[in-house]
Image (tube, helix red, strand yellow):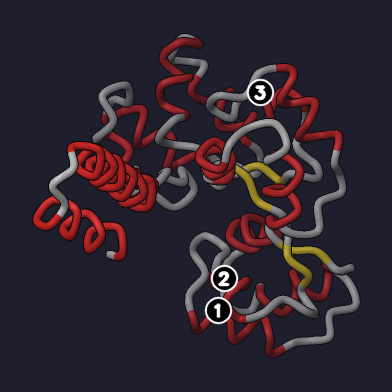
Amino acid sequence: MKHFLVMKHFLVDGPSWLLRVVAAWLLAGSLAVVAADETPDKAAAKKPAVLNPNLAGAEQLAARPEISEALAKSIVAARPFLTMQAFDALLAKELDEATRTKVYEAVFVPINLNTASREEVLLVPGVGKRMAHEFEEYRPYKAMAQFRREIGKYVDEAQVAHYERYVFVPIDLNTATRDEILAIPGVGKRMAHEFEEYRPYKSIEQFRREIGKYVDEKEVARLERYVEIR
């Protein structure tokens, strides 16, 4: 705003052509700042969410041009997919590698940054061998903030945010905040309460037993991917 006021003063009151040039320069700089502030937010807002094949409905999956209705039904019938490789193996029966690569931009089983195999990491859209090495280099990850900081040494914030859509770091069952629990795909307030209700957890077996009171074994196995006891 200050730049705009100075510019107005120069254009209206300043007779010198030099002042007019300076005013124009200030205007250009101000507009550039505004554009820099707005562009990332607008880009993020337009970016569609990545579908989790363990949660998406058959209709949502079939909306992808690469996925037929029959394949969508097969995906739903085969879940939960406890690894991205398992999902890839199913799709490989009907889709070639290039087509699967397109699918994974929009449909992906989030991978555990601490345990994912090299093959799984390479399935993350945009990740090559060199970046896969960097993903592994900083293990173990304690939080996504650590991932952002370390991978941010190699790519810009927008690219880090892109990678982040496909990965996760398990949360500590005994210390995770309510918001961290709710960030687990498919977990709502009621289930988050149950996670907290049985603290402290002494083992993952205890988690399976207690949460198994509310959901079936397959769902427990899916949820278990996102938690650990530290």
**Residue 73 falls left or right of residue 157:** left
Residue ID for mark 3: 122
158 and 220: which is toward the camera: 158
| Residue 48 visible | no
- Whether residues under marks 3 and 2 lie with C-beta atoms below 8 angstroms apart, the answer is no
Where is the N terminus found, in terms of image quarters? bottom left
Circle 3 sits in a helix, a strand or a loop, which is it?
Answer: loop
CA separation, marks 2 and 1?
Answer: 10 Å
Q: Between residues 226 and 81, which one lies in front from this camera angle?
A: 226
* Residue 191: assigned label: 1
State the CA–CA distance, disc 3 to disc 2.
32 Å
Q: Earlier in the sequence, mark 3 or mark 2?
A: 3
Q: Residue sitting at 82 percent across and 75 percent down?
A: 206
Going by the picture, which residue comes out furthest to the left? Answer: 12
Q: Residues within 10 Å of mark 2 (few under 14, many from 20)?
A: few
> Residue sitting at 76 percent across and 35 percent down?
135
- Relative to 136, say whether 51 is above or below: below
Q: Callout 1: helix, strand or loop?
A: helix
Residue plotted at (72% across, 49% down): 149
What is the number of the mark on residue 215? 2
Residue at the extreme bottom: 197
Q: Is residue 154 visible?
A: yes
Local packing at callout 3 (Cα closer than 10 Å; few below 14, some 14-19, many 20+) is some
Is residue 62 rendered to the left or right of residue 208?
left
